[in-house]
Image (cartoon, helix red, strand yellow):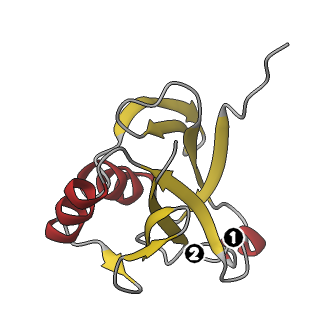
Amino acid sequence: MKQYIGSIALVVADYDEAIAWYTSVLGFQLLEDTDMGGGKRWVVVQPPGATETRLLLAKATTEAQRAHIGDQTGGRVFLLLHTDDFRRDYQRMLAAGAVFCEEPRDEAYGTVVVFQDLYGNKWDLLQLKNP
């Protein structure tokens, strides 16, 4: 039996600004942008080379949802973006305007740095020593 997480919903303020940020700053691919009617869209992005897990960019439609934009995990790191070349991706993201919360560091498990997405959600950029 095989199971995997296919998509993770990420609450965003605006579809177009989220698409622009994830594709230009993180280099993600836009897989789908389908109009669902009533201002709702089905927007899916994924990291280059990814085969399973994707992000569903879900526009907040209620005040309760809007209150969680940028704070989906209470200030903790929300998502871990694995890479096969930390320095390449760190430099590309830095040049594209990503906001880093710290300097890159080497840990027992790999090289890591915390960054924020356009709404303030914290992410790790991570290259494992033994993937």
Element under disc 1: loop
Residue 45 picture quarter: top left
Residue 69 picture quarter: bottom right
Residue at horizontal 34 percent and vertical 84 percent from the top? 103
Mark 2–mark 1 contact, CB under 8 Å? Answer: yes
Specify the farthest residue to the left: 95
Residue at horizontal 26 percent and vertical 56 percent from the top? 89
> Where is the N terminus found, in terms of image quarters?
top right
List the residue tagged with mark 1: 72
Element under disc 2: loop
Q: CA distance from mark 2 to mark 1?
A: 6 Å
List the residue tagged with mark 2: 70
Residue 15 spot, x, y in % from top left = 45, 52
Amino acid type, label 2: Gly
Is residue 29 placed above or below 99 in the rendered structure?
A: above
Specify the farthest residue to the right: 1
Q: Is residue 111 left or right of residue 92?
A: right
Specify the farthest residue to the top: 1
Is residue 61 placed above or below 53 in the rendered structure?
A: below
Residue at horizontal 40 percent and vertical 40 percent from the top? 47
Residue 94 spot, x, y in % from top left = 21, 70
Q: Is residue 101 left or right of residue 68?
A: left
Specify the farthest residue to the bottom: 102
Residue 81 spot, x, y in % from top left = 48, 53
Mark 1 neighbour class, 10 Å CA radius: few under 14, some 14 to 19, many 20 or more: some
Residue 33 spot, x, y in % from top left = 44, 32
Q: Is residue 126 left or right of residue 9?
A: left
